[in-house]
Image: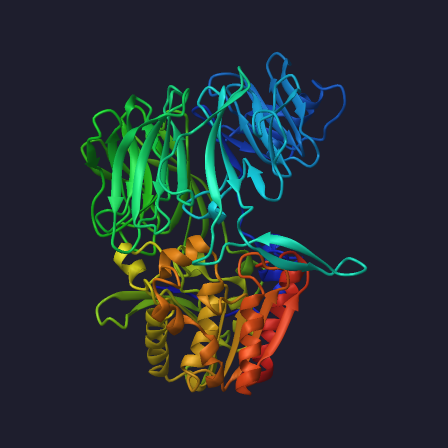
């Protein structure tokens, strides 16, 4: 499929137009509506008000809200939400302030302000309490404005070494936070992480008159890891019960969830080798182990990403996600009998559990059953019957109403910038609320031709999907310099059936400068099943590069690709791939720009590194073959490495080690760093970064 160019356009896109931090970026974004649900009523929020999405009738205004408070708070309608489905109550957020208002009576139900330095905020609507952290300590703000100290039964032993209530295990295993409220909001499960035994990686703060170091607790593969325990704080008694987990101290405790009655806590527990996963139930009053409900093992690794989600109509059964049959699917688990029933099946993956339709007793989910590049909306009933809801094409995101009988479906497709629809999940009928237009075309910009197709992987059988962006004013009789943009690692993909096949703004910018861009999702990337991802196990980079070189072979068959002017660029895992390709296939690539690269996996963190590589002690051959340090001697083309000087994800030791290896091998490369930045560059630094990347190709590839 092709996204056609606008032949009459004249203007050329700039980085200010295509980068999210650019001055003109948001002016060129497709039109949008900011939507939400108030129970079963779809609403739209604006800066001034909230109105019914179907009728346009005003529900509550900012002016109306501000009159109910002694001082004007300057709320925006975008700060409003409706947490109680059957009551006229609006939740208001502004900075650290949290308020709830009955907008019919004008009664203020809650008005509290968190400390200015509070982070990791977690609000429970039932108890109107907010958990938050300051430093390494965990607190709860009550509706009366009182602050309760959770850390170690009221003391404040939290520190750089001991951290309460924050995300642990370096955000792996689907972990994104460290506090978990019981349904009624009277108990709070939380993480306590002891990282005092983890070596400190010395980061440097150059903003001081005399530069200072600061500690970055960084557990490298095969080295000592941190230890995590789980506590349950009872707000009423102000006492903490510690969950009595079994296993080793450096096991992983993931995907915490509560039983609907708040009496049981469920944790997916994973051994450090990450090949034995158990779902364990714990008594929320005593912390006692109530038994293992489910166990999954695999010779390579098991990777839990989602907790239990209980059926609203049956508190004994919960939906669980697993790749046990090779594809991520939905299962129904009876927590009393331990009976497990598979709800979805097939050689495709469930990408997200969206919610439930209470009337039909079905599960609403997103999956790619029709095409690996798509994310479509489906319903599955308790017998495993699956129904498509709305359009199959495109990449969808959804919000369900209170009883799940309707959903707001926002999607894009290769030819649709944005479409928002109100979908009836009972009969599947949809009402269009917005179809956005192409702002680039309307404002007279030249738009490159974007296509998507497939080639066969190096294994000779697996289809791989690509995106190709051709130069503006493309002439098939000419030969063009070509840049391969690559990521290639797990839990990410580059090519999907979203607007313009997922093209990044920088690719369009490069097309205006006469480059052809090629982007291929190799084996190892996400949403293609367990075997597709695990093909890279214990030897990261090898199979991925073979697939990328199949892409190079394909490009060389195209008469308009200049095989003598081929470049490669990527960031993070893509930086690893870029450097690896430049050194492993030195005659194929003339220029490369590698951002924040992994250079040697023994310098990377425990959870991610050991999942895909095992430890250096277990897999010395794999670590040696995946290390780029011995390959520095092979470098021929022009390579620039760019990294954040204070990167806590891929620490600077990677890049600096490669620089030393290149010096020792008497090969040359260029280096650029962003002091004060981490793994990625944001704000105006991102504009500067992409100017630098572009200029490097302009200087050496054209």
- Whether residue 252 is visible here, answered yes or no, is yes
Using the image, determine if residue 302 lies above or below residue 445.
Answer: above
Q: Which quadrant holds residue 312?
A: top left
Residue at x-position 46% and y-position 36% = 229
Q: Position of residue 562 (x, y in %)?
A: 44, 85
Pick whichever, 655 or 305, lies toward us. Answer: 655
Image quarter in which the C terminus is found: bottom right
Query: Image height check: is 367 above or below 130?
Result: below
Classify the position of the N terminus by image quarter. Answer: bottom left
Left or right, 554 with reference to 437: left
Percent position of residue 570, x then y: 49, 68
Q: Residue at x 34, y 65 (%)?
A: 619
Please state if 116 lies on the left or on the right of 439 as rendered. Answer: right
* Front position in the image: 532 or 99: 532
x and y, in percent, of residue 142 in the image = 61, 20
Query: How many marks on residues?
Result: 0
Q: Quadrant of residue 309?
A: top left
In the picture as drawn, the residue positioned furthest to the right comes out as 209
Horizontal side, residue 210 vs residue 261: left or right:
right
Is residue 353 visible in the rendered structure shown here?
Answer: no
Q: Looking at the picture, tell me which residue is in the foreground, 146 or 486.
A: 146
For the point 75% across and 61% down, the residue is 211
Residue placed at 70% from the left, 23% from the top? 66
From this view, report whether residue 12 is shown above or below residue 639.
Answer: above
Q: Is residue 640 left or right of residue 559?
A: right
Q: Position of residue 365 (x, y in %)?
A: 33, 39
Type of colouring: rainbow
Q: Which of the two residues, 492 or 299, is positioned nearer the viewer here?
A: 299
């Amino acid at each position: 499929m092709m996204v056609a160019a606008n032949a009459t356009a004249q203007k050329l896109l700039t980085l200010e137009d295509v980068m999210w931090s650019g001055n003109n970026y948001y002016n060129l974004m497709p039109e949008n509506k900011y939507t939400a649900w108030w129970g079963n009523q779809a609403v739209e929020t604006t800066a001034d008000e909230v109105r019914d999405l179907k009728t346009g009738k005003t529900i509550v205004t900012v002016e109306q809200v501000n009159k109910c408070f002694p001082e004007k708070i300057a709320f925006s309608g975008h700060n409003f939400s409706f947490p109680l489905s059957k009551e006229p109550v609006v939740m208001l957020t502004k900075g650290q302030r949290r308020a709830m208002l009955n907008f019919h009576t004008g009664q203020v139900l809650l008005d509290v302000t968190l400390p200015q330095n509070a982070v990791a905020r977690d609000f429970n609507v039932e108890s109107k309490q907010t958990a938050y952290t300051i430093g390494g300590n965990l607190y709860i703000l009550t509706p009366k404005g009182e602050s309760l100290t959770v850390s170690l039964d009221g003391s404040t032993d939290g520190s750089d070494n001991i951290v309460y209530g924050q995300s642990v295990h370096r955000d792996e295993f689907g972990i994104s936070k460290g506090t978990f409220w019981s349904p009624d909001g009277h108990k709070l499960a939380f993480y306590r992480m002891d990282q005092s035994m983890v070596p400190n990686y010395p980061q440097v703060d150059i903003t001081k008159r005399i530069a200072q170091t600061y500690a970055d607790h960084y557990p490298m593969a095969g080295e000592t890891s941190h230890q995590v325990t789980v506590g349950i704080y009872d707000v009423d008694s102000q006492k903490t019960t510690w969950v009595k987990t079994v296993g080793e101290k450096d096991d992983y405790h993931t995907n915490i969830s509560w039983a609907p009655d708040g009496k049981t806590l469920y944790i997916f527990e994973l051994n450090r080798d990450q090949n034995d996963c158990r779902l364990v139930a714990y008594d929320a009053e005593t912390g006692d182990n109530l038994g293992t409900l489910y166990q999954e093992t695999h010779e390579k690794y098991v990777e839990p990403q989602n907790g239990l989600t209980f059926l609203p109509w049956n508190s004994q059964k919960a939906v669980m996600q697993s790749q046990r049959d090779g594809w991520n699917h939905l299962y129904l688990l009876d927590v009393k009998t331990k009976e497990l029933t598979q709800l979805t099946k097939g050689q495709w993956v469930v990408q997200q559990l969206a919610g439930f339709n209470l009337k039909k007793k079905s599960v609403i989910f997103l999956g790619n059953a029709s095409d690996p590049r798509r994310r479509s909306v489906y319903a599955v009933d308790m017998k495993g019957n699956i129904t498509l809801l709305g359009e199959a094409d495109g990449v969808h995101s959804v919000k369900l109403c209170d009883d799940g009988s309707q959903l707001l479906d926002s999607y894009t497709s290769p030819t649709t910038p944005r479409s928002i629809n109100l979908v009836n999940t009972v009969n599947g009928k949809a009402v269009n609320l917005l179809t956005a237009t192409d702002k680039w075309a309307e404002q007279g910009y030249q738009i490159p031709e974007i296509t998507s197709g497939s080639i066969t992987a190096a294994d000779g059988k697996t289809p791989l999907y690509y995106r190709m962006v051709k130069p503006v004013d493309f002439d098939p009789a000419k030969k063009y310099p070509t840049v391969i943009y690559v990521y290639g690692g797990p839990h990410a993909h580059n090519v999907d059936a979203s607007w313009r096949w997922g093209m990044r703004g920088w690719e369009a910018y490069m097309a205006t400068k006469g480059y052809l861009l090629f982007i291929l999702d190799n084996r190892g990337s996400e949403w293609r099943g367990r075997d597709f991802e695990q093909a890279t196990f214990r030897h990261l980079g090898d199979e991925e590069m073979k697939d990328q070189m199949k892409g190079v072979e394909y490009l060389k068959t195209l008469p308009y690709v200049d095989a003598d002017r081929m470049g490669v660029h990527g960031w993070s895992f893509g930086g690893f791939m870029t450097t690896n390709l430049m050194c492993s296939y030195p005659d194929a690539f003339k220029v490369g720009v590698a951002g924040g690269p992994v250079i040697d996996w023994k310098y990377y963190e425990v959870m991610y590194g050991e999942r895909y590589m095992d430890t250096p002690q277990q897999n010395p051959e794999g670590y040696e073959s995946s290390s780029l340090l011995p390959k520095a001697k092979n470098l021929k083309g022009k390579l620039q490495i760019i990294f954040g000087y204070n990167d806590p994800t891929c620490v600077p030791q990677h890049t600096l080690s490669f620089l030393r290896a290149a010096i020792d091998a008497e090969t040359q490369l260029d280096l650029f760093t962003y002091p004060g930045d981490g793994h990625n560059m944001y704000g105006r630094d991102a504009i500067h970064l992409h100017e630098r990347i572009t200029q490097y190709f302009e200087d050496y590839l054209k």
